[in-house]
Each structure stands twice: as structure tokens, then as C-alpha cells.
Amino acid sequence: MNRISLEKIKEKFEDSIKEVSEFRSELTCVVKKDKFTVICRFLRDDPELSFNFLSCVCGVDYPERNPRFDVVYELYSINKNHRVRLKVQVNENESVPSVTSIWNTANWHEREVFDLFGIDFEGHPDLRRILLPDNFEGHPLRKDFSLTREEVMFSHNLNRPPKIE
């Protein structure tokens, strides 16, 4: 992403960007949760930026930090061939606004973060487990998840077909 684009984002959302860093030409912006969807929509719709592909959403657990979790969004512009990483920080029992209305692929990505970290996505159309069985207890990518559990047999949730709208 070029410097002009970075300045455009910082100028438009000055009060909503907590931190900006760059490492090996990759830009990371830590943004406030309350303006997150507005920023995402701007990044997608602005013709100079055109971030039309959400390639990944993941969680990071920092149990000793407040806020505990980072939810990380990897955005890519197919037309402009540039990337940006957005981070939203939340505590346990807080939610992140869903971006499924902006990028359809967020549906499965957010469900995976919900399943493995237990982070809720406000406004998600179908927030339920995607990898683990419905009766699985806990969230295995949290750093305080116990590794001394009994073996679990996965049913692949075959008794629960996907919602089709």
C-alpha cells in the first residue's frame, strides 16, 4: 500500500486509529471497535484503496494483557495488489462487530474465531461452531485451555445441516 493511501486512512479516521505500524512493507492498523465497520466499508468502497477481498480473520490471545484478544483481519485489493492488516482489541465477554455485510467470506472466518477463541461477533447471521462438535467445551486456541482432556470423537456435526438462506 502506498503512502498516499495510508495518509488518506489516517486523515479520515484519525480518532479511530490507535496505532499504525509497518514491517517489511506490510501495514498494520489497530482500530477502535466502535468505528471498525465504518473503516472496513471505506477501505472496500474507496476507489483508490479497493480492498475487495477479506483473505483471513484470526484471533490472538494475550491472557496477561488488557484487552486480552486481538482479532486480526487481512485485507487484499485484487485491483491494486496491496494489503493491509486491521486489528481490533477486545476483552473476554466483549464482541466485535461482524463484517459479513461487507465481505461475505467473513461468515466462515468469524465462525472459526468464535469456535476456537470464544469471541462473539455482533450481528453475525449464523454464529455457531464450525470446526468442533456442538457439545465441545471450551475454546482450544485460548492459552488457558487445558491440554489434559479426554479424547474427543468428532461427529463433524452431520446431524446439523448448514443454514441456507
Image: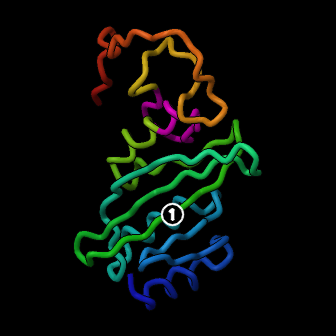
Identify the residue at horizontal 51%, vertical 67% (top origin): 39
The residue positioned 33% from the left and 48% from the top of the image is 104
In this orientation, which residue lies closer to the viewer: 162 or 20? 20
- Residue beneath label 1, please? 86
Place of residue 162 in the rendered image (x, y in percent of width and height, measured from the top left): 30, 23
Q: Position of residue 102 (x, y in %)?
A: 39, 55
Horizontal side of residue 70 vs 154, given as left or right: right
* Figure quadrant of residue 21: bottom right
Q: Is residue 37 above or below residue 130?
A: below
Give the farthest residue toward the front.
148
Q: Is residue 151 magenta?
A: no
Quadrant, the N terminus: bottom left
Q: Quadrant of residue 46?
A: bottom left
- Return the x and y of residue 9 as percentages of the image width and height: 51, 80
Left or right? Give the position of 57 relative to 71.
left
**Residue closer to the observer: 66 or 106:** 66
Asked whether, in this view, residue 43 is left or right of residue 148, the answer is left
Name the element at disc 1: strand
In the orientation shown, which residue stands out farthest toward the bottom? 4
Q: Nearer the viewer, residue 146 or 113?
A: 146
Coloring basis for residues:
rainbow
Q: Is residue 69 above or below residue 79?
A: above
What amino acid is at disc 1? Leu
Quadrant into which the C terminus falls? top left
Residue 120 shown in magenta: yes
* Residue 89 % position (x, y): 64, 54
Residue range of the region highlighted in magenta in the rendering: 113-128
* Residue at image point 60% right, 52% down: 70
| Residue 38 vs residue 33, the one in the foreground | 33
Q: Is residue 63 above or below residue 20?
A: above
How busy is the neighbourhood of tag 1: few (under 14 within 10 Å), some, or many (20 plus)? Answer: many
